[in-house]
C-alpha cells in the first residue's frame, strides 16, 4: 500500500512537494484561515471537537467542501424534507446520484438536474460544458444509459454585450460537450430578464434508461475490498469548486476562474462506455462519480453509505501535474473521474475493460472497518477524519425568514390599471420578438438533438419525446419555471412551475411520472431570500402531492446574487412523463386545414408577471396568476385521456404571452394559419389576449371529433370553448366579436424566428 | 449479407447504424467491429459511422485514419466491398484518401443539427437505386465540419465521372457546389454528411433513409446473383 509512484518520488526529491509551506494547524486557527474556505467560527470549533484536535490544512480543506451548502445542504435540508419523495413507481429517491422511476416491463427511467451557475458566470464555455458532463456522470454512475439531456438557462437582457457573450458561450459549451459524447440535447428553456444579469443560471438535466437489475449504489461495502480510481489524471483545476459555488459572486470571482473545471467530452465518452460495461459485467459493489468536491466527496459518501471507513493511498492517484499536495488532490474537481469498489479477485475483469477503452484505472485504496477516512501520502498518514463527522455532522441551519417588503407592496398593485393597448397586432409582434418568447432555434440548432436516433419530438414543442427502443413506449421530458411568477409570489410560482411542467408533458401525450428540481436562489442568510425558498418549496411540494409526481432528486444552488440584488427565485422543475404508446405522441403545431380549434380553461384578468406586462408596460409587478390545483388536475387528466383516445391533433399549453402567443405558436409550428373567435366576458381585448391565466390548453381536433371533445370536457367540468378553425395563411383572432389580431402567418413566423439571431449578430 | 459497423473511440452513431441495418436490411447480419481489427474479410458492407472519433482532436478524422482497421477498409474498398461513411465516417474516408476532398468548418462556424432536403443527383449507384433522379429526400444533418471542399481539377473530375451523388437543396454549411455526398470512381465507396440512419422511421421525422439501405441490399443481391 505504501508504494510511491515515480512521479511523487521525483517531486519529493526535488522539493517540489512542499507541504511545509502549508499553514500549520495552529496558524489555521489563529489566522482564521478556515474562514477563507467558507467555514464559520462555530463550525471550526465543532470540527476540532469531532477530531479531538485542530485540523491540519488538508483536513480543514476536506471538511470545508464536505460542509459546503453544495455538498451538505446545510441551509436547505429542513426545506427539502417538505417534498414528497416516495410513490408507487419510485425505485430510488433522493440521496444517490440520481432518482429512478419504474416505467414497466423491468425498465426504469433515471434522471436528475444540476446547476453550474457560478462556473458559467466566470467561464461560460467550460462552466456549461462541465455542467453537462457532471450530470451525465450522475446518470451512468447509477448504471443507466444516458438517452437525453435538457437544459434550463437564464440570462440578463440580450441587449447587453456581456450577456450576449455569456449566452453565446454557454450554448457553445453545452453543444461542445453533448454533441461529442453523443447524447442528444432534446429540450429545455431559455429566459431573459435583467434579474439574471451577472449571475446567469445554467441547469443541466440528464435522463437515462436502466433495467431494474442494473441499478447501482455508491457504497463502499465489504471491509478489505479495494477501491479504484477511473478516468484521467487529477490536476489542479476546480479546486474548491464546491465552496466557490456556495458563496456570492463578486468582482473577485473572475479571479477564481481556476475554480472552474475543464471538460473533455471524448474522455467522458470512453469512461462512460467502460463503466457501463463494467456494471454490465455484474462485479461492481459500489460506484460513484467524482463530482463536486472530487475525490473527497465521493470517497466520504461511499464509505458513509456503507457505514465503513476508507483508506486512500494518494501516492497511487494519477496526477497530471508534478508536486501536487494531498490538499490539492483531495479538492481537485478534475472532470470525468469515477470511483468504484469491487472484490479483489475481480480486478482482472475490470482492468481488461478499462484497458480496452484506453482509460486509466488504478487501485487507490481499501475499505476499512474503523469508520475513518484516512489519507496516506509518501509514507505518512496526512489526514485522518471520522466519516460520520464529514458526512452527517455538518450543522443544519434553520434560517430566519421574513416577508420581503416588495411582496407586501405588490398586494396593492392593480394590474388592470394600465391603459388599454389598442394596437394588439403590434403588441403580439412585440411579444413574439421578445427573446423569452421568440424561437430558440438559434440555440437548439447548435445541439445534436437526434443522435441515438430515438428523438421523436425534437426541441421546439411543449416537451421533447424520446422513444424507448424495442417497445411502443416513449418518454416525454421538459424543464419549467417562470422566475417572474416565483418572484411575485414564490408559493404560487412554485405551484405553477410544477403544474406547467406537468401540462407540457401531458400536451405531448404522456402521463407525468416524477420531478427533479433545481432550487436556484440568492443568499439564504438574507431572511427575505430564505422566505422565498420556503414559500417556493411549499408551493412545489403541494403541487407534487396533488399531481402524484414526487421529487426523486435534485440540486440546490444558493448565493445567486449580482451587484444589485438576488436573482429571481428560480426553482426549476425537470419532469419526465411516460407515453404509453407512440400513437399518443402529440405536438403543438396545427396539422390540417378545417380542424377545429378548442380552448380549454378560463381566461381571467391576470397580467401580473406576464410577458405582456414586461414587454409592453416595462414592469414586473402585482400578483401572478392563481393556479388552482383541482382545476389543473382535471384539465390534465381530461386532455391526456382525449389524446390517448386519439381525438387530438395538436395540443399546446398557454403560458408566456398568453392565448395570442399560444395560437401564433401553434400556427407557426404547423406552418398554417387559423381563424379564431374568443369570447372572454368582462375582459378587455388586450387582457383577454395576453393574460397568463393558468390551466389553459389550446387543442386542434378533426371536425368529426370536436363534439366528443367538447362533451368530454363538459362532463369533467373543464371549461371548454370552440374558438375557430385551422386554415389559410393568416392568424386572425376576434375577441368578444371585435377583430383584434390579423397578421400573416409568415410575418409572425419571421418576427418570432429572427428575434434572437438578429440580436446575436 | 454481412455488415460491419466500425467503432472508433468516440464513435457515437455506431448503435444507430446497427439498428438502422437491423430494421431495414432483411438480409443483413450486422456486427460492431473494433478499431483495432486488422481483417475485414467476409463483410459485404462496411459502415464508418458518425461521432467524434478520437474526440476530433487535431482535425476531424485525422487520427482515425491511422487506426489499424483503416488498412483493412482500404483493402476491402479496393476489392469492391461497399463502404458507407456517414458524417464523421465521411471525414475519415477523405482523411484516409478513399474519397477526394476535405470537410472544413461550416461557414457559420457553428455546429448545425436539423432536417435537410437532399437532391438525389445519381440514382444509378449501389447506394441510391431506390431513389428517383432529382428526387428530394429529407435526411437530417448534425455537424460542425461539413463544408465540402476540393480543388477545381478534382471538382471537374467528380462532375465528369458523375461522382456527386447528393446535393443540398438549401446549402447549410457552405459546401462547394452544394455537395452533400460523393462516391469514389468505382462507385463502391460513398461518403455523405447527412445521416440516413436517423431517417428510418416516420416517428423520427423521416423514413427517407430507408431506401439507401434497401438500395445497398438490392445491389448486393444483384451482384451475388451474377456471381452465382
Image (spheres, helix red, strand yellow):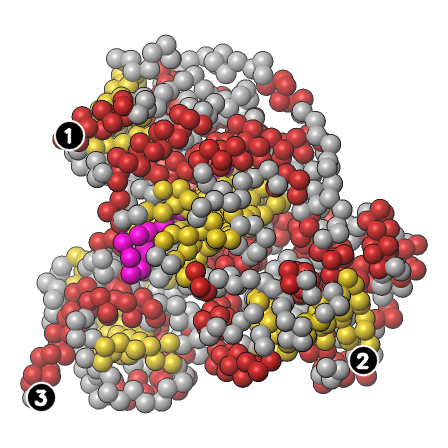
Q: Which residue is mark 2?
A: A379
Q: Which residue is mark 1?
A: A703
Q: Which residue is mark 3?
A: B227
For this view, does B222 lie left or right of residue A84? left
Magenta highlight range? A466-484
Residue at image location 46% in from the left, 41% down from the top: A549
Does residue A611 lie above or below A592 as drawn? above
Residue at image location 33% in from the left, 51% down from the top: A474
Q: Position of residue A530 (x, y in %)?
A: 67, 34
Residue at image location 30% in from the left, 33% down from the top: A639
Does residue B180 lie above or below B67 as drawn? above
Q: Position of residue A588 (x, y in %)?
A: 30, 38
Question: Which tag, 1 or 2, sits closer to the chain's start?
Answer: 2
> Which of these two is toward me, A466 or B226?
A466
Q: Are marks 1 and 2 in one subunit? A: yes
Residue lying at the far top of the rendered structure? A682
Does residue B228 lie above or below A726 as drawn? below
Q: Are marks 3 and 1 in one subunit? A: no
Amino acid at each position: 500500500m505504501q508504494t510511491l509512484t515515480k512521479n511523487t518520488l521525483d517531486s519529493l526529491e526535488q522539493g517540489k512537494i512542499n507541504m511545509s509551506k502549508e499553514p500549520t494547524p495552529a496558524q489555521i486557527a489563529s489566522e482564521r484561515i478556515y474562514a477563507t474556505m467558507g467555514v464559520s467560527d462555530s463550525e471550526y470549533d465543532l470540527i476540532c471537537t469531532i477530531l479531538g484536535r485542530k485540523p491540519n490544512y488538508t483536513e480543514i480543506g476536506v471538511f470545508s467542501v464536505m460542509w459546503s451548502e453544495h455538498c451538505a445542504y446545510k441551509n436547505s435540508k429542513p426545506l427539502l424534507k417538505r417534498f414528497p419523495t416516495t410513490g408507487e413507481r419510485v425505485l430510488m429517491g433522493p440521496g444517490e446520484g440520481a432518482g429512478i422511476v419504474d416505467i414497466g416491463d423491468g425498465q426504469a427511467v433515471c434522471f436528475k438536474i444540476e446547476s453550474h451557475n457560478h462556473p458559467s458566470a466566470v467561464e461560460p464555455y467550460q462552466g456549461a460544458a462541465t455542467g453537462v458532463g457532471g450530470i451525465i456522470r450522475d446518470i451512468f454512475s447509477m448504471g443507466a444509459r444516458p438517452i437525453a439531456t435538457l437544459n434550463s438557462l437564464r440570462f440578463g437582457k440580450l441587449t447587453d454585450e456581456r450577456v450576449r457573450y455569456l449566452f453565446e458561450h454557454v450554448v457553445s459549451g453545452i453543444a461542445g460537450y453533448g454533441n461529442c459524447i453523443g447524447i442528444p440535447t432534446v429540450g429545455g428553456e431559455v429566459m431573459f430578464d435583467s434579474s439574471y444579469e451577472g449571475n446567469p443560471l445554467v441547469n443541466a438535466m440528464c435522463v437515462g434508461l436502466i433495467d431494474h437489475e442494473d441499478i447501482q449504489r455508491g457504497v463502499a461495502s465489504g471491509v478489505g475490498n479495494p477501491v479504484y480510481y477511473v478516468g484521467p489524471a487529477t490536476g489542479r483545476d476546480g479546486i474548491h469548486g464546491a465552496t466557490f459555488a456556495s458563496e456570492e459572486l463578486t468582482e473577485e470571482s473572475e479571479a477564481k476562474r481556476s475554480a472552474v473545471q475543464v471538460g473533455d467530452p471524448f474522455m467522458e465518452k470512453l469512461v462512460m462506455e467502460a463503466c457501463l460495461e463494467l456494471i454490465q459485467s455484474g462485479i461492481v459493489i459500489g460506484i460513484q462519480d467524482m463530482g463536486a468536491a472530487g475525490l473527497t466527496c465521493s470517497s466520504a459518501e461511499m464509505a458513509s453509505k456503507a457505514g465503513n471507513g476508507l483508506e486512500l493511498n494518494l501516492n497511487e492517484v494519477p496526477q497530471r501535474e508534478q508536486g501536487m499536495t494531498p490538499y490539492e488532490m483531495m479538492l481537485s474537481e478534475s472532470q470525468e473521474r469515477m470511483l468504484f469498489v469491487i472484490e479483489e479477485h475481480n480486478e482482472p475483469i475490470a482492468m481488461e475493460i478499462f484497458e480496452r477503452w484506453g482509460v486509466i484505472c488504478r487501485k487507490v485504496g481499501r475499505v476499512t472497518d474503523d469508520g475513518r477516512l484516512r489519507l496516506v501520502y509518501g509514507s505518512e498518514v496526512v489526514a485522518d477524519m471520522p466519516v460520520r463527522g464529514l458526512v452527517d455532522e455538518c450543522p443544519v441551519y434553520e434560517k430566519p425568514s421574513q416577508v420581503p417588503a416588495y411582496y407586501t407592496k405588490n398586494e396593492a398593485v392593480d394590474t388592470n390599471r394600465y391603459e388599454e393597448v389598442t394596437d394588439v397586432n403590434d403588441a403580439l409582434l412585440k411579444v413574439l420578438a421578445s427573446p423569452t418568447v421568440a424561437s430558440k432555434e438559434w440555440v437548439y440548432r447548435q445541439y445534436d438533438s437526434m443522435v441515438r436516433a430515438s428523438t421523436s419530438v425534437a426541441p421546439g414543442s411543449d416537451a421533447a419525446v424520446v422513444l424507448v427502443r424495442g417497445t411502443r413506449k416513449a418518454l416525454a421530458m421538459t424543464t419549467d419555471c417562470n422566475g417572474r411568477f416565483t418572484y411575485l409570489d414564490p408559493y404560487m410560482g412554485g405551484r405553477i412551475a410544477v403544474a406547467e411542467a406537468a401540462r407540457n408533458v401531458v400536451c405531448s401525450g404522456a402521463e407525468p411520472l416524477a420531478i427533479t428540481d433545481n432550487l436556484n436562489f440568492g443568499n439564504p442568510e438574507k431572511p427575505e431570500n430564505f422566505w422565498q425558498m420556503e414559500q417556493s418549496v411549499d408551493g412545489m411540494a403541494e403541487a407534487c402531492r396533488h399531481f402524484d409526481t414526487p421529487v426523486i432528486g435534485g440540486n440546490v444552488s444558493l448565493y445567486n446574487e449580482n451587484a444589485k440584488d438576488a436573482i429571481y427565485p428560480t426553482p426549476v422543475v425537470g419532469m419526465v412523463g411516460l407515453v404509453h404508446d407512440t400513437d399518443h405522441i402529440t405536438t403543438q403545431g396545427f396539422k390540417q386545414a378545417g380542424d377545429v380549434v378548442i380552448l380549454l380553461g378560463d381566461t381571467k384578468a391576470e397580467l401580473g408577471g406576464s410577458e405582456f406586462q414586461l414587454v409592453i408596460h416595462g414592469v414586473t409587478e402585482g400578483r401572478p396568476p392563481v393556479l388552482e390545483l383541482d382545476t389543473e388536475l382535471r384539465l390534465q387528466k381530461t386532455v391526456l385521456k382525449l389524446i390517448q383516445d386519439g381525438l387530438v391533433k395538436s395540443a399546446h399549453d398557454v403560458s408566456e404571452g398568453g392565448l395570442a402567443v399560444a395560437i401564433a405558436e401553434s400556427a407557426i409550428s404547423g406552418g398554417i394559419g387559423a381563424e379564431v373567435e374568443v369570447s372572454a366576458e368582462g375582459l378587455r381585448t388586450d387582457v383577454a389576449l395576453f393574460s397568463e391565466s393558468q390551466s389553459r390548453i389550446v387543442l386542434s381536433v378533426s371536425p368529426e371529433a370536436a363534439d366528443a371533445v367538447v362533451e368530454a370536457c363538459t362532463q369533467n367540468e373543464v371549461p371548454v370553448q370552440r374558438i375557430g378553425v385551422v386554415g389559410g395563411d393568416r392568424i386572425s383572432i376576434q375577441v368578444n366579436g371585435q377583430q383584434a389580431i390579423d397578421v400573416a402567418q409568415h410575418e409572425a413566423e419571421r418576427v418570432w424566428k429572427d428575434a434572437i439571431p438578429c440580436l446575436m449578430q | 449479407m454481412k455488415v460491419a459497423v466500425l467503432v472508433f473511440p468516440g464513435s457515437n452513431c455506431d448503435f444507430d447504424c446497427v439498428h438502422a441495418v437491423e430494421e431495414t436490411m432483411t438480409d443483413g447480419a450486422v456486427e460492431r467491429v473494433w478499431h483495432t481489427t486488422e481483417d475485414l474479410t467476409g463483410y459485404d458492407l462496411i459502415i464508418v459511422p458518425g461521432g467524434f472519433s478520437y474526440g476530433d482532436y487535431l482535425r476531424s478524422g485525422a487520427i482515425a485514419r491511422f487506426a489499424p482497421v483503416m488498412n483493412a477498409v482500404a483493402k476491402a474498398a479496393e476489392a469492391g466491398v461497399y463502404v458507407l461513411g456517414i458524417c464523421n465516417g465521411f471525414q475519415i474516408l477523405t482523411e484516409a484518401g478513399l474519397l477526394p476532398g476535405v470537410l472544413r468548418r461550416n461557414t457559420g462556424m457553428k455546429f448545425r443539427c436539423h432536417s435537410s432536403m437532399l437532391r438525389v443527383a445519381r440514382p444509378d449507384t449501389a447506394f441510391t437505386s431506390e431513389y428517383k433522379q432529382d428526387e428530394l429526400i429529407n435526411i437530417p444533418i448534425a455537424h460542425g465540419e461539413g463544408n465540402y471542399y476540393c480543388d477545381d481539377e478534382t471538382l471537374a473530375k467528380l462532375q465528369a465521372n458523375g461522382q456527386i451523388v447528393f446535393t443540398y437543396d438549401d446549402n447549410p454549411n457552405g459546401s462547394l457546389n452544394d455537395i452533400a455526398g460523393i462516391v469514389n470512381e468505382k462507385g463502391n465507396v460513398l461518403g455523405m454528411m447527412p445521416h440516413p440512419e436517423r431517417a428510418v422511421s416516420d416517428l423520427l421525422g423521416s423514413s427517407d433513409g430507408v431506401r439507401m439501405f434497401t438500395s445497398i441490399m438490392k445491389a448486393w443481391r444483384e451482384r451475388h446473383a451474377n456471381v452465382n
